[in-house]
Image (spheres, rainbow, N blue to C red):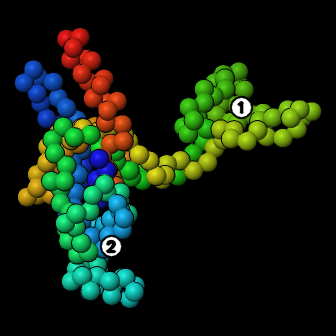
Amino acid sequence: MNIGILGKKLGMTQIFTEDGKFIPLTVVEAGPCTVLKVHEHKLTLAFGDRREKNTPNPELAVYKKLNSKPKAYVREMAFDSDEGVSAGSQITADIFKEKDFVDITGTSKGKGFQGGVKRWGWAGGPDSHGSMHHRRVGSIGGSSYPSRVWKGLHMPGRMGNKKNTVQNLEVIKVYKEKNLILIKGPVPGANNGYLEIRSAKKIPIVREKTEKKEEKK
């Protein structure tokens, strides 16, 4: 089943179980999302308020037509069924339920330009005897063969600030009134970063592993 919603990462917390263990949670503000357009098995969703003066006139006309405030984050989401959904309607947090599994996409934290030791986990060179080669790159290719640098070689460069997806995260709690979803584990990005929350593509695989663990117990 394909469903989804847009949201914002608010931060992390934890809850304790009856046996004293704790579960790390990410608090996500999910919706309400305004439906801008209905395609075939796809919906264009908008989330997060935006000032009118910062909104281009063509976009502003679309929101005024729907009697909606301008939105900051717009994405297209796949839906198996669009029955009862029309332009201007709302998608809320209760689209997901407890024990559902979701895939969450966000932009990872940017860490700027970093060397290979931090970016790729290089071991580094000797620390003693005046090596002068503690965190340097070193040789990156032979002179006679291949006479070039191999494509995809790990090198220093920009770290983070990329679109990442974490799969198979469990929904622990849904608060429809507060537009909140509690997700087990961490999700990509910093606090207040926008997220795309979709139903997990590998639900059958996750459930099979869970059932096998329960049978062993």
Q: Secondary structure at mark 1?
A: loop
Q: Does 42 sit above or below residue 123?
A: below
Q: Is residue 163 or residue 21 the one in the foreground?
A: 163
Expressed as whole percent of the image width and height from the top left, the position of residue 48 reads 27, 68
Q: Is residue 37 above or below residue 195?
A: below
Q: Relative to 100, is 160 on the left or the right?
A: right
- What amino acid is at disc 2? Lys
Residue 93: percent from the left, percent from the top?
A: 18, 56
- Which residue is found at the position 16% from the left and 45% from the top? 97
Amino acid type at mark 1:
Met
Q: Let me know if residue 25 appears in the view.
A: no
Q: What residue is pinned by disc 1?
A: 132
Left or right for 72, reference 131: left
Residue drawn at (30%, 25%), measured in percent from left and top? 208
Q: Nearer the viewer, mark 2 or mark 1?
A: 2
Q: Which residue is labeled 2 in the image?
A: 37
**Viewport quadrant of the C terminus:** top left
Q: Are marks 2 and 1 in contact (CB under 8 Å)?
A: no
Q: Residues within 10 Å of mark 2 (few under 14, many from 20)?
A: some
Q: Residue at x 68, y 41 (%)?
A: 152
- Decide which of 1, 44 is in the foreground and name it: 1
Res 121 quadrant in image: top right
Q: Is any part of residue 182 visible from this angle?
A: yes
Q: Earlier in the sequence, mark 2 or mark 1?
A: 2
Question: Residue 57, image x and y in percent?
Answer: 38, 88
Q: How many marks?
A: 2
Mark 2 lies on a secondary structure that is strand
Q: Is residue 88 above or below residue 7?
A: below
Name the spot of residue 156 as percent of width and height, x first: 63, 44
| Lateral position of residue 58 relative to residue 152, left or right | left
Among the 4 quarters of the image, the one containing residue 12: top left
- How far apart in space, not on screen, are marks 2 and 1 (Cα)? 60 Å
